[in-house]
Image: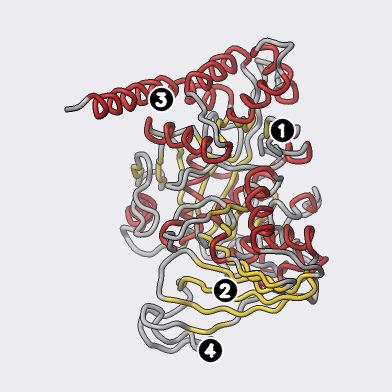
C-alpha cells in the first residue's frame, strides 16, 4: 500500500477518534442541561461518529473553510463548565463569532457573555408540557418519533398518550410495530416494548399510554396523570371550532392543535411566518397543511425581495391514505382511481391558505395539485409574476443566503445538484427545499421548484408550533448577526426542533 493511501486512512481514523470523543460531551449537554448542539443546522445530538464528521464537513460547504473538531471540543468543554439552561447552540456560529469579536476575551468569557440570556438557577427545573396524540397515522407516528427524541430531561414537550379506536385483540402490539418499523422513514432509532397490563408503549424510556376511545369529549385524561395537555388532532376528522372544541370538554386538556388547515376563525399557523400570532387565549390552533408550510416561507422571501403581483402554485404531491390503492368508489372526484397506478388531478387549498399566514398575498395566487404514484416527498412549482425584474442567479443566491443565515433557515433549505431526486429528501426537517438548478427566470417572470417531505418536514413544523404554544422552545444562540450574514436578534426566539432524521435535523 503506497504512502498516499496510508495517509488518507490515518487521517480518517484520527477524525473518527476525535468524533467519538465529542459524542459523550454532546450527550451530557443535552441530557443534563437541555442544550441542543448543531453545526450550521446539522444536529450533533444522537449522531454516530460518522454523523459528527459529516456535520463538520458541511461547515466547509457553508463557509469554504474547514471546522476542526478540536475547536468544537474546546467549545463543548467550556459549555459544560458554564452549565447553561435549555438552548439551541450553533457551535460553528459561536466559533466564528469568537474569531470575529472575541479578541479581547478568553473563549470562556466570550461564551459566558453570549449565553447570558440562557443562564439559569442551577437548582431550577423547567416545567414540561403534556402532549396527547389523537390519532396515530402517518403524521401521528412521526410526531411520536420526534417527541420521543426530544424527551431529554423531561422539561419540554412530554408525549404522554395516544388516543385511537381499538382495532382488535392485538391492537397494542400492532401499534407498537407500526412505530417501530416504517416503510418510508425506516426503523425507529431506539428500543420499543409493550406493557399490555398498563396499556402502554415504552419507547426509549418514554411511557406512552394507549387510550381507546370513539368520543373526544368522553376521556378523563387526569385519570392517567395527564394535566393541562395539548391534544394534537391528526385524524383530519374535525376541522372547525365546533368539532375540535369537543377535546376541550375532556378533563386534563388545555389546548388543541390541528394538523390540517383549520376552518373559520381558527388561526392557521406556518411556523417561521406567523407563529407570533398565537395568543394565550387561542385554545384551538391549526398548523395548516404540508403544502402551505412548504411554499409560504419561499413566497414570503420572494415577495419581500421583489414583490409578487400574482402567481400559480402547482403541487406534484405523493399519494395519501385518502386515495384508493385500487379502483373503487370514492366520494371525491378522480380519487377513486388507483393511487399506485395513476397521476390524479385534484384540488388544493394551499394557494388560498397562504393568505391566512401571509395576508399580503391574499387574492394573488391560484393553485392546483396532481397526485402521483410515490409514497412520500412532493414538489411545489411556484410560477409568479414579480413587480420588478431580476435574474436567475440573483434569485438563487438570495434564496441560498436566506436558507443559511435568516430567521427562516429552519423552514427553507437550498440545493443545487444535477442528480437529486425525490427520495433524497425523505427525512428532511425543513418545510421546503429550493432546487436552484430548476429555477427559471425571464425578466419579471419567475418559476421556482420547491421539494418537501410532506410527512417529516411537515411534522417538524408541527413540533415547532407545539413548542411555541407550550412556551418550551429553546432560545437560539448566537442571536446577533455575524460577518457571514448570521442570524438577527429576532431569530433568538425561533423554535428549532430536533427530529431524528436521515437528513440530519436540528433543533
Viewer-nearest of labels 2 and 1?
1
* Cα–Cα span, label 4 and label 3: 54 Å
Q: Do the numbered discs 2 and 1 sit on residues whose CB atoms are within 8 Å?
A: no
Which residue has dot 3 on it?
19
What quarter of the picture does the C terminus occupy? top right
Q: Earlier in the sequence, mark 2 or mark 3?
A: 3
101 sits to left or right of 206: right
- Alpha-carbon neighbours of circle 3 within 10 Å: few (<14), some, or many (≥20)? many
Q: Nearer the viewer, residue 254 or 477?
A: 477
The residue depicted at 60 percent of the width and 81 percent of the height is 347
Q: Which numbered dot is residue 483?
A: 1
Tell me the element at label 2. Answer: strand
Of circles 2 and 4, the one toward us is 2
Q: Is residue 217 left or right of residue 306?
A: left
Between the C-alphas of marks 2 and 3, the distance is 41 Å
Residue 344 x/y as whole percent = 48, 83
Q: Which residue is mark 2?
A: 315
Amino acid at each position: 500500500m503506497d504512502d498516499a493511501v496510508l495517509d488518507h486512512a490515518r487521517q480518517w481514523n484520527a477524525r473518527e477518534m476525535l468524533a467519538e470523543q465529542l459524542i459523550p460531551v454532546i450527550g451530557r449537554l443535552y441530557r443534563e442541561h437541555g442544550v441542543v448542539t448543531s453545526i450550521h443546522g446539522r444536529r450533533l445530538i444522537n449522531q454516530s461518529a460518522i454523523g459528527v464528521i459529516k456535520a463538520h464537513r458541511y461547515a466547509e460547504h457553508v463557509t469554504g473553510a474547514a471546522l476542526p473538531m478540536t475547536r468544537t471540543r474546546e467549545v463543548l468543554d467550556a459549555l459544560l463548565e458554564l452549565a447553561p439552561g435549555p438552548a439551541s447552540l450553533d457551535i460553528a456560529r459561536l466559533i466564528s463569532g469568537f474569531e470575529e469579536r472575541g479578541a479581547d476575551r478568553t473563549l470562556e468569557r466570550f461564551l459566558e457573555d453570549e449565553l447570558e440570556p440562557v443562564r439559569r438557577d442551577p437548582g431550577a427545573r423547567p416545567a414540561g408540557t403534556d402532549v396527547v396524540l389523537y390519532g396515530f397515522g402517518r403524521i401521528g407516528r412521526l410526531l411520536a418519533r420526534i417527541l420521543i427524541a426530544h424527551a431529554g430531561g423531561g422539561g419540554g414537550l412530554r408525549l404522554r398518550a395516544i388516543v385511537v379506536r381499538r382495532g382488535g385483540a392485538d391492537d397494542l402490539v400492532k401499534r407498537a410495530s407500526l412505530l417501530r418499523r416504517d416503510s418510508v422513514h425506516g426503523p425507529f432509532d431506539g428500543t420499543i416494548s409493550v406493557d399490555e397490563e398498563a396499556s402502554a408503549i415504552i419507547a426509549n424510556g418514554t411511557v406512552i399510554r394507549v387510550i381507546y376511545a370513539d368520543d373526544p369529549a368522553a376521556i378523563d385524561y387526569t385519570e392517567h396523570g395527564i394535566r393541562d395537555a395539548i391534544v394534537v388532532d391528526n385524524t383530519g376528522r374535525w376541522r372547525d371550532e365546533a368539532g375540535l372544541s369537543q377535546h376541550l370538554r375532556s378533563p386534563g386538556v388545555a389546548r388543541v392543535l390541528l394538523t390540517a388547515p383549520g376552518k373559520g376563525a381558527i388561526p392557521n399557523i406556518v411556523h417561521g411566518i406567523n407563529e407570533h400570532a398565537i395568543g394565550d387565549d387561542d385554545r384551538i390552533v391549526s398548523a395548516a397543511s404540508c403544502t402551505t408550510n412548504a411554499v409560504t416561507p419561499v413566497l414570503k422571501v420572494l415577495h419581500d425581495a421583489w414583490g409578487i403581483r400574482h402567481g400559480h402554485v402547482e403541487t406534484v404531491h405523493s399519494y395519501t391514505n385518502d386515495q384508493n390503492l385500487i379502483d373503487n368508489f370514492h366520494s371525491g372526484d378522480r380519487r377513486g382511481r388507483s393511487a399506485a397506478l395513476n397521476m390524479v388531478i385534484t384540488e388544493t387549498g394551499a394557494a388560498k391558505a397562504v393568505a391566512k399566514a401571509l395576508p399580503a398575498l391574499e387574492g394573488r395566487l391560484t393553485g392546483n395539485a396532481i397526485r402521483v404514484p410515490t409514497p412520500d416527498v412532493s414538489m411545489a412549482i411556484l410560477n409568479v409574476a414579480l413587480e420588478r425584474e431580476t435574474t436567475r442567479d440573483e434569485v438563487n443566491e438570495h434564496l441560498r443566503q436566506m436558507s443559511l443565515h435568516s430567521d427562516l433557515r429552519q423552514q427553507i433549505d437550498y440545493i443545487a445538484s444535477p442528480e437529486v431526486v425525490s427520495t433524497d429528501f425523505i427525512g428532511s426537517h425543513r418545510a421546503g427545499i429550493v432546487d436552484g438548478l430548476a429555477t427559471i427566470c425571464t425578466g419579471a417572470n419567475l418559476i421556482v421548484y420547491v421539494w418537501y417531505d410532506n410527512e417529516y418536514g411537515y411534522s417538524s413544523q408541527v413540533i415547532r408550533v407545539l413548542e411555541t404554544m407550550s412556551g418550551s422552545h429553546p432560545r437560539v444562540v448566537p442571536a446577533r448577526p455575524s460577518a457571514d450574514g448570521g442570524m438577527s436578534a429576532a431569530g433568538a426566539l425561533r423554535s428549532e426542533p430536533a427530529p431524528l432524521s436521515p437528513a440530519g435535523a436540528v433543533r
